Amino acid sequence: MSLIMSSLVIFCLVSVGSCSNRDNCIAIIYTEADFQGTSWEIYVTGEYDLWWKIDKEAENPRMIFDLPNDTIASIRVRPGYKVTIFEHAELAGDSLVIDVDMPSFGERWIDQASSLTVFRIEDQELVGRWQASVKSDSTEFARGEIMDRDEIAAIIEENSEVFSELIEAGENQWYGDTTDDQRINVAGYMLGLFEALGYDVFSWTPNSFAQSINNFYDWRKDLSLWHTACLVLNVDGAMYEEIFSSSRRRSLG
């Protein structure tokens, strides 16, 4: 069996849509510090909660907290609005009120929020300056060491069997009959693959990477394991899939 199949025993695999007009955003929330990573753009005031905690029968049900649980690391808030983040779902636990851009939440609040509220306040003086800052945010994916296509193809070819499984497997296979240790082993292998492709993954451990994949699958269940791992790291995974597909076509042809 392949490396992943052996590790998982039975290894029976999302990109977030970009905002069409950020001028109208109330807030933009990011999974990484310094306004990087996966982003969630908010346009409507109100209360936001984890989808499985929302009471759809309520007169005014909360809206969906549209990021994985416990992944908020930085936030932009349009002048004239305030965002209150809560430690737990259902607007419970400790809270933090934010009415300015925060490039980092610091140790206490990074990756801690599970629900939030967004409301309007009266001060609109800084809207133009905030809009200019939003437009300067990077929309590029994180880049690794510069490698040419042949180098990338060689690495993918060395890992072709595993790479194929990463593309084909999904949330059901990530969990399935697997144990925590087996998922951590697979996460460690994927980190090694990203490092070989030139990415700096020094801040990740197999355990923290596996936990982030868990969180993203709690949020969205429709993506391949490869796509989910790339989303966690803010990597353009489509390029590698295209190189893999081209290499496979050549080998079959």
Image (cartoon, helix red, strand yellow):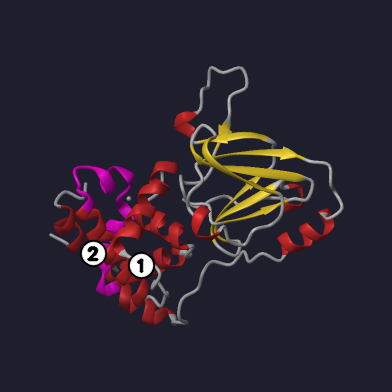
Q: Which residue, given by chain and number where applicable, does mark 1 sit on?
A: 244
Judge the density around disc 1: few (<14), some (14-19), many (≥20) Cα neighbours within 10 Å: many
Give the structural element (helix, strand or loop) at label 2: helix
Please name whichever residue, 184 or 220, is drawn nearer the observer in this view of the structure: 184
- Tell me the number on the disc at residue 214: none
Q: Is residue 245 above or below residue 111?
A: below
Residue indicated by mark 2 = 161
Note whether residue 220 is visible.
no
Q: Amino acid at mark 1?
A: Phe
Q: Which part of the image, by quadrant, shows the N terminus? A: bottom left
- Magenta: main secondary structure: helix
Could you say whether the residue bearing mark 1 is in a helix, strand or loop? helix
> Is residue 165 among the parts visible in the rendering?
yes
The residue at the point 33 percent across, 65 percent down is 205
Q: Residue 234: give x, y in percent of width and height.
A: 49, 62
User: Magenta includes 178?
Assistant: yes
- Which one is earlier in the sequence, the residue at label 1 or at label 2? 2
For the residues labelled 1 and 2, the Cα–Cα distance comes to: 11 Å
**In which quadrant will I find the C terminus?**
bottom left
Q: Give the answer, above or below, for where 57 lies relative to 244.
A: above
Q: Position of residue 214 (x, y in %)?
A: 35, 48
Relative height, residue 249 to residue 181 (above, below): below
In the image, which residues are magenta?
A: 157-180
Q: Is residue 136 left or right of residue 104?
A: right
Does the segment drawn in magenta span residue 253? no
